[in-house]
Amino acid sequence: MTQNKIDPFTPPDNGYHECPSPIRHSKLVADWAALQRIFIRPEDDDGKAVIIKYMEQILFGLHEFLNSNVGITEEISLKELTRDYMGTLISPDPEKRLADVISDIIGRIAPRAVNVASPYFVGHMTAAIPFFMVHLKAITAALNQNVIKLETSKVLSVLEKQVLAKIHRIIYNLDDDFYSDHVQSIDTSLGSFTTGGTTANLMALWVARNRFFMAGRDFDGIEAEGMARALGHRGLDRALYLISRSGHFSLKKAGGILGVGNKNVISVDIDSSYKMDVSKLSRMIKSLKGGGGRSENRYYRRCRRGRSHGNRHR
Ligand SMILES: Cc1ncc(COP(=O)(O)O)c(C=O)c1O
């Protein structure tokens, strides 16, 4: 490989890009050519044509694209489908051109996926997305920011806090001073985005658990010390929380993850409008109080607040 003086991406000629193996192109090798192909250089003209063909359809005619390429266009039983996905060996020649990967997805995967945007589709939660989400996703994928830390996000972290404050304001509508103090405060947080409902439920219950079993005399908090020490510290033999009978199963899972135990996630009946039946809730708390201490019952109530969609962004 010759050194190209005007190309800032050309690596120093340290031999790293050289691959002496005769089967060079049948293995995934992190040589310079491969790195350049993956991270820097676009596809060749043929490849570009395939990408543009499909991207144009997706970006400017999403609905038609989904209707003609996705789901219910091919009927196949699950059993038949699994037959095509039995191989567990990685191909000795795994490299593919992006254009081929795209053609593969459109030709082999999309017809067997579910068209959740179809008006005939009946399913839980997932549905059509506004067409512009695809455009915005392309931009966010290209930016690839990570709000875990400022050095990978900068303005995105600041923007995230502002959006959380706006959501907080929709729900709690506190005064201007409150929001000026907290919107960009590095010591407080008005909420947290999560990746979905399961993690939202888990996070709400995690916060509730940690607040109840917070650090005290000779105790560094449940997060540091674990459930056994935490219960001992409060003189309890178990912790539990109450959820609606129609609560999502992730609430039970959270009981396992948080060390509460999913047997200790207790369902309360719902009324005719599918809301938690408050009188039954109150009876349940009374009966539990008979078997548990006062502090244990405070824990039930706190955790109960973290049960539904509405708490996602807290
Ligand atoms: C109330 C509730 N919580 C949690 C979830 C799980 O959400 P996700 O699939 O985003 O983890 C759902 C989704 O059905 C839900 O309805």
Image (cartoon, grey):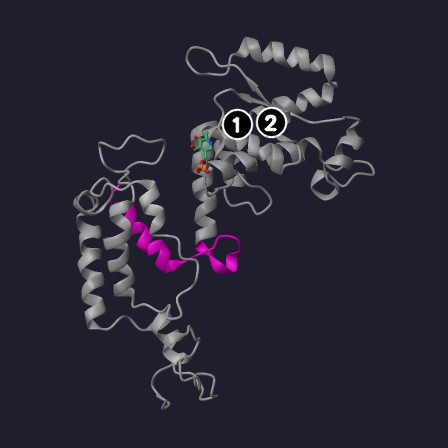
Q: Answer above or below: position of 248 versus 105.
A: above
Q: Amino acid at mark 1?
A: Arg
Bounds of the magenta segment:
130-155
**Quarter residue 17 falls in:** bottom left
Residue 220, how many percent across, how many down?
Answer: 76, 41
Q: Main secondary structure of the magenta part?
A: helix
Residue furthest to the bottom: 2
- Label 1, ligand 1: CB separation under 8 Å: yes
- Find ligand 1 in the image and state its quadrant: top left
**Dot 1: element:** loop
Q: Amino acid at mark 2?
A: Cys
Residue on which the image places disc 2: 303
**Quarter residue 224 falls in:** top right
Residue 1, how many percent across, how many down?
Answer: 37, 89
Q: Considering depth in this image, is 83 or 194 the residue closer to the camera? A: 83
Looking at the image, do the residues carrying marks 2 and 1 touch, with CB atoms under 8 Å apart? yes
**Quarter residue 208 falls in:** top right
* Label 2: few (<14), some (14–19) or many (≥20) C-alpha neighbours in 10 Å: many
Q: Can residue 257 be seen from the camera position used here?
A: yes
Residue 199, how many percent across, how many down?
Answer: 51, 39
Q: Considering depth in this image, is 53 or 28 the residue closer to the camera? A: 28
Left or right: where 312 falls relative to 91: right
Residue on which the image places disc 1: 307
